[in-house]
Image (cartoon, grey):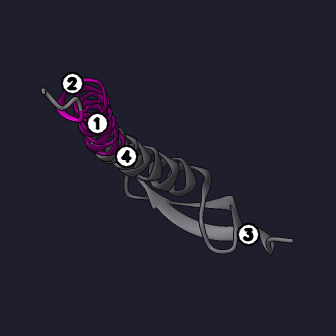
C-alpha cells in the first residue's frame, strides 16, 4: 500500500502549496511517469511486431523449403527410380 501524505509542499507558479502525494509523487508526477511508460510500451510493441514478422518470414521460408524437398523426393520416387531396359 502506498504511503499517502496530505501535507506535502510543492511550489506551483511560485507559490508553496500543500498537495496530497503517494510515495512522494503528486498526481502530475504520476501522470507524467505513466505517459512516459506508455510511450516506452508503444516502442516495445513496435519492436515486438518487427521481430514477430521476421520470425514468421523465417517460418514461411522453412515451410517452402520443406515443400520443395518433399516435391523433389516425390519426383525422384516416381521417375528417377524407374530403370529403362
The secondary element bearing badge 2 is classed as helix
In the displayed orientation, state which residue is furthest to the right: 1
x then y, percent, for residue 44: 37, 49
User: Is residue 65 shown left or right of residue 41?
Assistant: left
Q: Is the C-beta separation of discs 3 and 2 under 8 Å?
A: no
Depicted 67 relative to depicted 13: above or below = above
Depicted 39 relative to depicted 29: above or below = above
**Gap between marks 2 and 1, in whole Å?**
10 Å
x then y, percent, for residue 24: 63, 74
Which disc, if any, is residue 79?
Answer: 2
Range drawn in magenta: 52-81
The quarter of the picture where residue 52 lies is top left
Magenta region, main secondary structure: helix
N-term mark: 4 or 1: 4
The quarter of the picture where residue 23 lies is bottom right
Which disc, if any, is residue 73?
Answer: 1
The secondary element bearing badge 3 is classed as strand
x then y, percent, for residue 26: 60, 59
Which disc, if any, is residue 48?
Answer: 4
Q: Is the C-beta separation of discs 3 and 4 under 8 Å?
A: no
**Gap between marks 3 and 2, in whole Å?**
89 Å
**Gap between marks 4 and 1, in whole Å?**
37 Å
Total count of labels: 4
N-term mark: 3 or 2: 3
N-term mark: 2 or 4: 4
Q: Is residue 55 within the magenta segment?
A: yes
Amino acid at each position: 500500500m502506498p504511503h499517502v501524505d496530505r501535507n506535502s509542499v510543492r511550489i506551483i507558479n511560485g507559490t508553496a502549496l500543500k498537495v496530497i502525494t503517494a510515495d512522494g509523487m503528486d498526481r502530475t508526477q504520476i501522470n507524467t511517469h505513466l505517459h512516459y511508460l506508455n510511450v516506452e510500451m508503444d516502442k516495445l510493441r513496435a519492436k515486438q511486431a518487427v521481430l514477430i514478422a521476421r520470425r514468421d518470414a523465417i517460418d514461411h521460408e522453412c515451410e517452402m523449403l520443406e515443400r520443395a524437398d518433399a516435391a523433389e523426393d516425390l519426383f525422384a520416387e516416381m521417375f528417377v527410380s524407374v530403370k529403362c531396359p
